[in-house]
Image: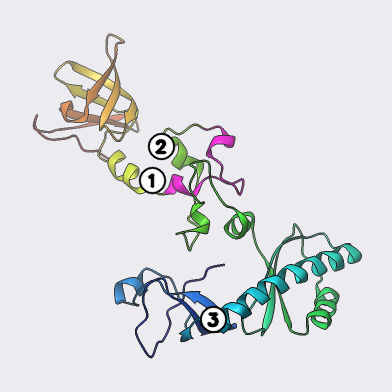
Amino acid sequence: MRTLHVMQARRTYQRGQTVIARTPRGLEVGEVLTEASPAAVDSIKDPPGGSIQRVVTPEDQVEIARLAQMARKEFTRCQEVVREMNLEMDLIDIEHIYGSERVVIYYLAEQRIDFRELVKRLAADFQTRIEMRQIGVRDEAKLLADYGDCGKPVCCNTHLHQMPPVSMKMAKMQKATLDPNKISGRCGRLKCCLRYEYDTYEELRLQLPPIGSDIVTHEGRAKVTGHEILAQQLIVQTEDNRRLLIEAHEVLSVIRKSSGRQRMESSDEDDSSDELSE
């Protein structure tokens, strides 16, 4: 699952080097990303530890290839046992830990499943510890997906190490199409990239008078009916029912209706309008 670790090291390693590391799961293959500076460590929530043992050797490369081939055979065997036992689960992937301390089986399932017999049979076949790990559809994409609609490798399988929460509100604020087929990723859920610019949109939106507010401009009073957030423009309807697109800095004052009362706060002509609240 490409977990980020903060590792102890007895020497300096270069970015991109493939190494053998000791983790809570045993010996694993990893890639060096960066020095564990305070800023880098603070960007990760509760990172697991470990220690780098050595740079991958030619002998390690042979062993890595052998384990990859073994994992494919183990996956096939696991599928056979699941079918024999009529278990309602979908196998996604099998990971054979480098040190052979365990085999991790990733699966999808709608309901709770009793794996005791399955684990017993697989442990006898594979002669190692079996770990069953239930994952969601986003994790499935993280393991198996290749390219997204943008033509680039999917984010969850490249730079994302944590899945950000994504909501339809984010798509609406950015005025993205609401067609599920166009805003859904390979996992079938909302695309992670809808989250990337949301904070900027939210910050800029708060600088605009809220929709429904009455405002005063050089042209008179009008009601805000829409936002062009990135352009910092307002769609307004004037008292004579004209619809105009104006710049935010053209707003002289904002009237916010609340509980049948009106509050008005004036601003200088050169200042942007502020959102007022009771």
Magenta-tinted stretch:
178-195
Q: Counting residues from the N terminus, which is met first, the one under dot 3 or under dot 2?
A: 3
Specify the quadrant that holds the N terminus. Answer: bottom right
Q: Tell me the residue that label 1 is attached to.
A: 198
Q: Tell me the residue that label 3 is attached to.
A: 58
- Identify the image quadrant of residue 249: top left
Residue 97, above or below 248: below
In front here: 57 or 177? Answer: 57
**Residue 173 marker:** 2
Is residue 243 visible to us here? yes
Q: Nearer the viewer, mark 3 or mark 1?
A: 3
Amino acid type at image mark 1: Tyr
- Write the residue at 45% across / 34% down: 176
Q: Which residue ends up furthest to the front in the rendered image?
A: 58
Amino acid type at image mark 2: Met
Mark 1–mark 2 CB contact (< 8 Å): yes
Residue 66, above or below 262: below
- Describe residue 259's horizontal placement relative to residue 193 as left or right: left
